[in-house]
Image: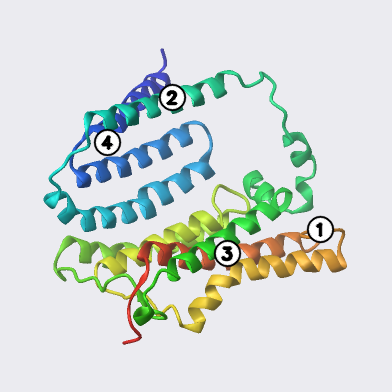
Amino acid sequence: MSIATVFEIVLAAVVLTLGVWTIVVPETFSATVGFVAYGLLVALIWVRLDAADVALTEAAIGGGLGGVLLLSAAARLRDADMMADEAPGKLLRAGAAALSVLTAAALAGAVLWLPDSAPTLAPAAVANAWATGLSNPVTNVLMAFRAMDTMLEKIVLLLAIVGVWSLAPDSAWGGRPGPRHQADPRGVLAFLARLLPPVGIVIGIYILWTGSDHPGGAFQGGAVLASMWLLAVMAGLADTPLVSDRSVRFILVAGPGLFLLVGLAGLLFGAAFLSYPPALAKPLILGIEVAMTLTIAATLGLLLAGVPERGMEP
């Protein structure tokens, strides 16, 4: 048995053990930390499966933004946990366990019953990859062969932020999302908030730029940028912007708006909606990716910041 095989077996055992521990541990904060660690280990599994783009997304969302969201929720629920007098009954626990087992069995059955030679469009995508000038097959598929899905995903993010903002009370409409965070200026959080963002911003920009030829892209880069901004906000070094700020709203619509404009240009001057002229395909896609990175970073950060809670005060 090779070292790589032993490592993969140990990794699978650790992930399963950590998943079970996250479910059974009674403390909310401990479960949250376990879930964040679980996401980072799953990212390592995707690396072992040679799915580097998926691994980057899992690490940025599961270990980064998801961790920030869950830790914030755990902090807000801490008082509720202390005041809770009733624990879930045995019937509820048994029902949840049974539902989990049935879901796992259904997923396992679906995987086992997959045909040996599943239908695929990979040969067609590879044969026409030259048209975009991109070397990364994942970015090639996302921005060309399923560009409509990619554009609609960004529109869904935009609709999500509109839905969150619509929950704000009238007194806070147009104000700042979330509470004003304060942290010990000499504490670990403030130290990390000063140390990591410059490095994280460079990494996020690099992930965006290299995504045309190597693993990476707008979503992963935008998620990293959002994580760095939220770290500064949680440390009290920055504040969330006014949702009524025109520049904020422009950034939120920049990605989907440019994507839509390029698509309409393809409909008017090209072969079809979202078709790129071969000579301009790569510059157009890179321009869309830059705009989408800004939109994704702002949208994810504001979604995790939450509902506007404070008025128009500076």
Task: Report the amino acid beneath label 3.
Answer: Met
Disc 4 to disc 2, C-alpha distance? 19 Å
Residue furthest top as drawn: 1
Q: Residue 292 got which mark?
A: 3
Residue on which disc 1 sits: 278
Residue on which disc 2 sits: 102
Considering the image in quadrants, where does the C terminus appear? Answer: bottom left
Looking at the image, tell me whether mark 1 or mark 4 is earlier in sequence order.
4
Q: Secondary structure at mark 4?
A: helix
Q: Position of residue 202 (x, y in %)?
A: 44, 63
Disc 1 to disc 3, C-alpha distance? 21 Å
Looking at the image, tell me whether mark 2 or mark 1 is earlier in sequence order.
2
Disc 2 to disc 1, C-alpha distance? 49 Å
Considering the image in quadrants, where does the N terminus appear? Answer: top left
User: Which residue appears at 80% of the width and 68% of the height?
Assistant: 265
The one of 225 and 161 positioned closer to us in this rendering: 161
Answer whether labels 4 and 2 touch (C-beta < 8 Å): no
Looking at the image, tell me whether mark 1 or mark 3 is earlier in sequence order.
1
Task: Report the amino acid beneath label 4.
Answer: Thr
Answer whether labels 2 and 3 touch (C-beta < 8 Å): no
Q: Residue 218 got which mark?
A: none
The one of 129 and 141 positioned closer to us in this rendering: 141
Answer whether labels 4 and 3 touch (C-beta < 8 Å): no
Disc 4 to disc 3, C-alpha distance? 34 Å
> Could you tell whether 71 is left or right of 260 in the image?
left
> Could you tell whether 261 is left or right of 161 in the image?
right
Mark 2 vs mark 3, foreground winner is 2
How dense is the environment of label 2, judged by Cα within 10 Å: few (below 14), some, or many (20 and up)?
A: few
Residue on which disc 4 sits: 22
